[in-house]
Image (spheres, coloured by chain):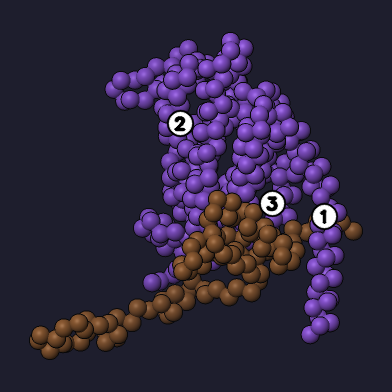
Amino acid sequence: MSTDTQFDLWEVFIQSKSGLPYMHAGSVHASDNKMALQNARDIYTRRGEGTSIWVMPSKYIVASNPDDNDMLFDPANDKAYRHPTFYTMPEGAKNI
Amino acid sequence: MHNEHSDTHFQLRIDNGEHIEAKDYMPENYRKHLIRQMSQHAHSEVIGMQPEGNWITRAPSLRAKQILLAKIQDEGGHGLYLYSAVETLGVSRSELIEQLQSGKAKYSSIFNYPALNWADIGAIGWLVDGAAIVNQVSLQRTSYGPYSRGMVRICKEESFHQRQGYEIMAKMMAGTKDQQAMAQDAMNRWWWPSLMMFGPHDTNSPHSSDAVKWKIKRETNDELRQKFIDKTIPQAELIGLVVPDKNIKLDDNTGHYTISEINWDEFNRVISGHGPCNKQRIDHHIKYHNEGEWVREAAIAFKKKHTKKELETV
């Protein structure tokens, strides 16, 4: 039987400089974690784009559904007390 | 917000300049258009490795060889960025490869022309990559998020491609009479096919209007072609190359060059499979895909062995 597989899909995250957050760069196909890391390196960091790479199988990513956005990301404007400007500071208060 | 699954709401988001992401609602024809355009783009990057790959072993210096290798590796990478972006729309890589190999999916007709000598490598980098860049810079603002992000990444890498090509042409034009003649010959053969890369005129482009309405395309074929013409003609003249078109004229009022009519019969012939290298390109792709089978088998066997070991040590 022919093995015309394209392997599993992996997502690639790259940290461009130490201290910065890891950003999603794209995806690669690979049969195992070693190949995934090697492919991610070869495809996404040929010009010093990163100092560190994470790869993870795409099937383990759980994503929110855009239909739920209103509910999930309700800015809760009625909860103004979550913002520092809600509070009245006594006249003359400094460094606060 | 009401009825987020309606085409009206979708168009509203587009008109507001929002990006569409993989899980967002999109009209079926938007998805179809993207799959066709993006996969065509991915296939072009990959098939585009062939005319240049032909010259790796014959590059005139070690410097030229290193550069060409790096450029071709980039093209492969660009193909992969694009394939992974298309896959977010729910098509598998195997389906995409199958569509390419069966001829169902197209790729840029330019890659059906042969690279006959070293000057062709210069002309491909300067003109073909140059035309591709004009298109890709515009596509950085395309409405589909994964496509747009891929384009940003590609554009960062692509400008070296065009510069290395122009450097080859400039060097040859500063060289012997024979070298100048080779460069001019390559210019003559690649100029018109490069202009055809932008596709048919707007008045004759079957998919254009929806693509513009949905902001998949941000500029039309003719607008992009004109940008390329305007910046390329002065580059040719600077190094002494003659553009193979007797009717070229700079319109002082508009600041744009006008050119002769493009030979659309040739364009249609090549795109429908009758260019000089159509069959060769696909045969080559199939051959190497099949010859790579043992590598895929080995990778799967390796994975199985390791999964088994991991389970045993738990």
Q: Which chain is brown?
A: A
- In percent of the image, x 42 and y 23: which residue is there? B234
The front one of B167 and B132 is B167
As drawn, is B187 to the left or to the right of A69?
Answer: right
Instruction: Kindly check if marks 2 and 1 are in contact, taking CB atoms under 8 A apart as contact.
Output: no
Q: Chain of mark 1?
A: B
* Quarter of the image with the C terminus of chain B in it: bottom right
Residue B69 is tagged as none
In what element is the residue under mark 2?
A: helix
Look at mark 3 in the image and give the residue it sits on: B96
As drawn, is B228 to the left or to the right of B290?
Answer: left
Mark 2 vs mark 1, foreground winner is 1
Whole-Å distance between the Cαs marked 3 and 2?
30 Å
Q: Mark 2: give few (<14), some (14-19) or many (20+) Cα within 10 Å.
A: many
Q: Colour of chain B?
A: purple
What percent of the width, then of the height, locates residue B309? 83, 77
Look at mark 2 in the image and give the residue it sits on: B228
What percent of the width, then of the height, locates residue B37? 57, 46
Look at mark 1 in the image and give the residue it sits on: B295
* B217 relative to A77, above or below: above
Q: How many numbered tags mark residues here?
A: 3
What percent of the width, then of the height, locates residue B128? 56, 32
Disc with the residue nearer the chain's start (3 vs 1)? 3
Q: Residue furthest right?
A: A1
- In percent of the image, x 58 and y 12: which residue is there? B176
Disc with the residue nearer the chain's start (3 vs 2)? 3
Instruction: Kindly check if marks 3 and 1 are in contact, taking CB atoms under 8 A apart as contact.
Output: no
The front one of B135 and B300 is B300
The front one of B293 and B247 is B293
